[in-house]
Amino acid sequence: MTGVGWLRGFLGRSGGTSRQTAAGQRVAGDPPSANGASSLHLFWHLDGHFAAAEVTLEVLEAPVVDRLYFWALQASFSDGRRELGAAHLGLQWHPSYPGSTAVNWGGYRNGAGELDGSASALPSTLGNPNTRDLVWRPATPYRLRIERGDEPGAWRGLVVDPDRGPVEIRRLYGGGTHLCSLMTWSEVFARCEHPPVTVRWSDPVAHDDDGRAHRPASVSVNYQSHADGGCANTDAYADSSGLCQRTATVRRTPLGATLSVP
């Protein structure tokens, strides 16, 4: 989230001192970024404007520390001429929520200003309109879907639970008529050396106005820079089932690399 500028984190900067290797790479300590997080992004190679977008998320290695982790599908809202803002739908490991599991569907207008949304049917332990209580399990596939709502400029955020089926989080008033600039990302508020956490993204797809499916063949890899407070020991890679992002590991895929979508 930090890598797209005006999409700001929901928590303030954490305390602590970061440690660097002899080469100047940050591999320990709290990320000294503006919001206290280190972020990894996968930018979809998919041009066009769409009525819906979705992807499957699995938390393969769950967090074990009491820090916030956020994994999301992000889309920008467009009126066909310009981008109006962007929003993110995803699961969170959030120590202040029951069982440390939550879901978030929120975003910002272009040039800042948090988006309004409808009331959610899900409770929120912290009373946050964007972050709601939701039970999710590691090693379980959850389908994240953003689609047009019934009202003009409204966008539904849904999580498809393999047991419960689709769960609507709420509608977000992002404006516009289409989605564009699609990506998935991990935002990690843990120390760089905290135990590894791995997530997998699979079957990314966007749907046009006629319902046709458009699948990106590849993605671009991005890591939050050292100057912006990112950890150097994060990595993105493809396995047989999807695209993975991992913390506290050796970085083998360089910044700017292209990964094919399995």
Image: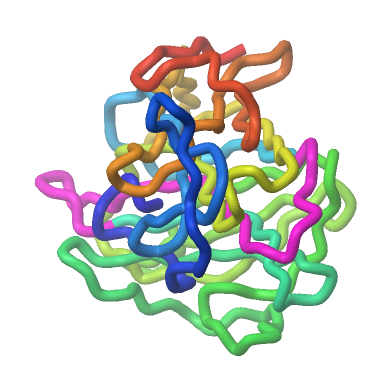
Residue 50 location, x and y as percent? 36, 39
Residue 32 location, x and y as percent? 40, 56
User: 91 and 81: which one is in front?
Assistant: 91
In screen coordinates, is 146 left or right of 32? right
What segment carries the magenta color? 59-85
Residue 7 location, x and y as percent? 32, 59
Q: Quadrant of residue 166?
A: bottom right
Q: How many marks?
A: 0
Q: Height in image: 169 above or below 160?
A: below
Residue projecting furthest to the left: 81
Q: Height in image: 65 above or below 115?
A: above
Inspect the magenta stretch and tell me whether residue 219 lies in it. no
In screen coordinates, is 256 left or right of 63? left
Q: Is residue 211 visible?
A: no
Q: Quadrant of residue 35?
A: bottom left
Name the residue: 62% across, 12% down: 262
In screen coordinates, is 207 left or right of 197? left
Residue 22 location, x and y as percent? 44, 27
Residue projecting furthest to the front: 22
Name the residue: 67% across, 40% down: 57
